[in-house]
């Protein structure tokens, strides 16, 4: 059943953000999302759909998430300010009482036992009241602090979702751009970092032959291989449709090359067979390009040079890894014109 037909039958408006939810759910690329969609009422409200959208596609709901957090912060801070203003007034009154009492005690001629008892009684009540209010303020501030901590956690969760590719659950292009730029923040990172770019070979042919759901599944499988076969601290991102990037630290160019080639070989050997139909969608191969950060002058230059190495792998027959250092003295007049595939 098509995405549009399903949405129409469930009475869902044909908004782009709704289409994204149902497309991901019906292709089965995100089991958790599929389960939530199946569990919805026959005619879900737009509010329900937007809650799901914010959970799984935070990048498309950035404004709403940030605006909600802003409103919550403004409300809580105003409550705290109002509380402190009231407390300031109460403390000022307590201070006035202390001043008046002090002045009264200085008049020794008018002092008597009854007056002292009265003064002690008044001060006792005032002090107890002030202490009680202090405890109430502390409790209220603690409650507000917990609420603000909740907002902070929600924003941190949103930040993670905003930097995560929804299809593969690895880092996305937004996160990659930030991480790539960070390499050139200090000399140590430049000395010990490298960029690997990878691209699935002839991916358009796979989509044309088997359809986009199969293509999405292949992208997920490739991402899983890349993520599972490197150290957990290694940065792996999906930077485009069938394009991936790996940022490595602390290894030589040759070690990085050997890692990339192992990843390439692992993907080449995967069967890529549909579990439902038994149809073989492989073999699937990838081409890769490597550039050390010391061979580039900036994040953009590093990306461009790794991309040139990737292009060299493509024109040399695909399914291979190329180091930029082996091609930098060779002319590549048309390398920016190639279409990845």
Image (spheres, rainbow, N blue to C red):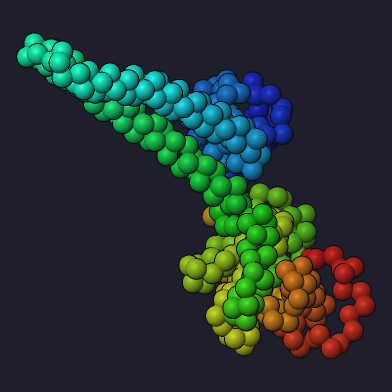
Give the residue at x 78% y 72%.
Answer: 301
Give the residue at x 68% y 65%.
Answer: 181
Q: Is residue 268 visible?
A: no
Left or right of 232? Residue 115 is left
Left or right of 235? Residue 205 is right
Residue at the far right in the pictured view = 333
Q: Is residue 230 visible?
A: yes
Residue 247's place in the image compared with 61, above or below, is: below
The residue nearer to you, when weighing 288 against 62, is 62
Image coordinates for residue 129, horizontal then vertical, percent = 23, 19
Give the residue at x 64% y 43%.
Answer: 59
Image coordinates for residue 21, horizontal then vertical, percent = 62, 37
Which image quarter is the C terminus in? bottom right
Give the residue at x 84% y 88%.
Answer: 329
User: For residue 313, which quarter of the picture?
Assistant: bottom right
User: For residue 208, which quarter of the picture?
Assistant: bottom right
Residue 153's place in the image compared with 181, above or below, is: above
Residue 28's place in the image compared with 5, above or below, is: below
Which image quarter is the N terminus in? top right
The residue nearer to you, when weighing 25 against 106, is 106
User: For residue 323, which quarter of the picture?
Assistant: bottom right
The residue nearer to you, when weighing 44 against 82, is 82
Left or right of 331? Residue 55 is left
Image coordinates for residue 175, horizontal then vertical, percent = 63, 57
The residue nearer to you, when weighing 17 against 177, is 177
Q: How many marks?
A: 0
């Amino acid at each position: 059943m098509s995405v549009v037909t399903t949405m129409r039958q469930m009475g869902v408006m044909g908004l782009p953000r709704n289409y994204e939810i149902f497309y991901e759910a019906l292709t089965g690329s995100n089991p958790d999302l599929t389960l939530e969609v199946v569990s919805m009422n026959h005619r879900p409200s737009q509010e329900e759909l937007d809650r799901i959208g914010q959970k799984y596609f935070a990048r498309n709901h950035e404004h709403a998430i940030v605006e909600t957090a802003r409103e919550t912060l403004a409300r809580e801070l105003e409550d705290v300010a109002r509380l402190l203003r009231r407390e300031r007034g109460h403390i000022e009154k307590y201070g006035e009482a202390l001043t008046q009492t002090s002045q009264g005690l200085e008049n020794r001629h008018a002092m008597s036992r009854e007056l002292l008892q009265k003064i002690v009684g008044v001060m006792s009540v005032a002090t107890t009241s002030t202490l009680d209010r202090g405890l109430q303020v502390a409790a209220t501030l603690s409650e507000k602090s917990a609420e603000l901590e909740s907002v902070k956690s929600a924003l941190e969760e949103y930040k993670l979702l905003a930097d995560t590719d929804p299809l593969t659950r690895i880092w996305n292009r937004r996160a990659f751009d930030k991480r790539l730029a960070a390499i050139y923040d200090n000399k140590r990172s430049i000395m010990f970092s490298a960029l690997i770019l990878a691209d699935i070979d002839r991916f358009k042919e796979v989509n044309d032959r088997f359809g986009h759901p199969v293509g999405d599944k292949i992208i997920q499988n490739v991402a899983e291989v890349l993520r599972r076969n490197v150290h957990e601290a290694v940065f792996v991102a999906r930077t485009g449709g069938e394009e991936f990037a790996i940022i490595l630290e602390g290894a030589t160019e040759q070690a990085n090359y050997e890692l990339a080639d192992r990843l390439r070989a692992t993907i080449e050997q995967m069967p890529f067979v549909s579990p439902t139909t038994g149809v073989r969608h492989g073999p699937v191969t990838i081409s890769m390009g490597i550039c050390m950060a010391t061979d580039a002058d900036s994040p953009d230059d590093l990306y461009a040079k790794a991309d040139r190495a990737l292009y060299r792998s493509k024109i040399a027959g695909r399914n291979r890894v190329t180091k930029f250092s082996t091609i930098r003295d060779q002319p590549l007049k048309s390398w920016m014109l190639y279409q990845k595939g």
